[in-house]
Amino acid sequence: MECKKDQNLKNCNCSYEPCAKKGICCECITYHVKSRQLPACCFPNQAERTYDRSFEHFARLVNEKRV
């Protein structure tokens, strides 16, 4: 399968600038799930900027109807 990095970058809201996985979704998801996290694209921009990408943070946002 061919990576669509350029296309993925158009929708990537990751604010961590030195991220080497930006736009390479398969690597990003694998990395975050191993750490019990979700990637930036699962979070609204304001929540993403906190860098708290934990499952628990996502669940709180869901309960608050912010996701």
Image (cartoon, rainbow, N blue to C red):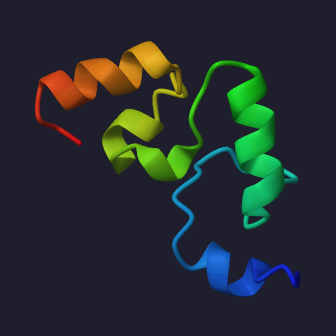
Residue at the image point whose x is 88% and y is 53% from the top: 20
- Residue 47 in percent (x, y) is at 36, 34
Q: Tell which of 59 and 50 is nearer to you.
A: 59
Residue 22 visible within the image: no
* Quarter of the figure that contains the C terminus: top left
- Horizontal side, residue 1 vs residue 40: left or right: right
Vertical relation: 66 (above or below) 12: above
Q: Residue furthest front?
A: 1
Residue at the image point whose x is 56% and y is 79% from the top: 10
- Residue 54 in percent (x, y) is at 52, 20
* Quarter of the figure that contains the N terminus: bottom right
**Number of marks in picture:** 0
Residue at the image point whose x is 73% and y is 85% from the top: 6
- Horizontal side, residue 55 vs residue 30: left or right: left
- Horizontal side, residue 26 vs residue 38: left or right: right
Vertical relation: 59 (above or below) 19: above
- Residue 31 in percent (x, y) is at 80, 36
Residue at the image point whose x is 64% and y is 76% from the top: 8
> Which of the 4 image quarters holds residue 39?
top right
- Horizontal side, residue 38 vs residue 62: left or right: right
Residue 41 visible within the image: yes
Vertical relation: 57 (above or below) 67: above
Q: Tell which of 15 and 31 is nearer to you.
A: 31
Q: Residue furthest left?
A: 65
Q: Residue furthest top?
A: 56
